[in-house]
């Protein structure tokens, strides 16, 4: 049976999903990519916005003329991803 993801791993998965989509992703797509419920995703997004790791923009869709929300990773969020990868490599090197 798989182990549960830690809080940091959840944050990493969310930011990585955004980065893999070119730095911008719709909230529904992010929910599926990071494998989280709507409620839990919103909780994490609120925290990540408060820490300025992501921001939510509104884009106008040409056909509908209505705004769509898009989650965008910030430079600070990209820095977190780089440092988390470094930390993961370090712990993997020691078999932890």
Image (cartoon, rainbow, N blue to C red):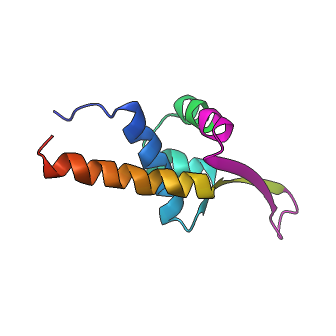
Q: Does the magenta stretch include residue 50?
A: yes
Relative to the observer, which residue lies in front, 60 or 54?
54
In the visual, does 84 lie left or right of 37? Answer: left
Viewer-closest of 90 and 61: 90
Q: How many numbered marks are there?
A: 0
Residue 3 occupies which quadrant of the picture? top left
**Magenta extent:** 46-66
Q: Where is residue 18 in the image (x, y as percent from the top left)?
A: 53, 57
Question: Which residue corresponds to the image point at 88% horizontal and 63% vertical from the top-left?
Answer: 65
Identity of the residue drawn at 41% across and 37% down = 8
- Left or right of 45, for residue 9: left
Q: Residue furthest left?
A: 95
Where is residue 5 drawn, in percent x and y?
Answer: 32, 34
Q: Is 2 placed above or below 23 here?
A: above
Place of residue 32 in the rendered image (x, y in percent of width and height, measured from the top left): 48, 48
Q: Which residue appears at 43% of the width and 46% of the height?
A: 12
| The image quarter in which residue 50 lies | top right
Q: Does the rendering let one see residue 5?
A: yes
Vertical order, 86 against 52 (above or below): below
Q: Answer whether residue 41 is magenta in the image.
A: no
Horizontal side of 21 relative to 12 (left or right) equals: right
Query: Which image quarter holds the C terminus?
Result: top left
Residue found 15% across the figure and 52% down from its top: 93
Instruction: Look at the image and tell me in which quarter the N terminus lies.
Output: top left
Taking the image as drawn, is residue 34 in sight? no
């Amino acid at each position: 049976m798989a182990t549960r993801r830690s809080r940091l791993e959840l944050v990493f998965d969310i930011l990585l999903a955004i980065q893999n989509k070119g730095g911008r992703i719709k909230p529904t797509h992010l929910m599926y990519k990071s494998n989280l419920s709507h409620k839990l995703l919103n909780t994490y997004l609120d925290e990540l916005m408060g820490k300025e790791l992501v921001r939510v923009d509104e884009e106008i869709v040409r056909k509908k003329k209505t705004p769509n929300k898009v989650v965008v990773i910030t430079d600070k969020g990209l820095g977190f991803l780089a440092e988390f990868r470094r930390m993961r490599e370090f712990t993997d090197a020691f078999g932890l």
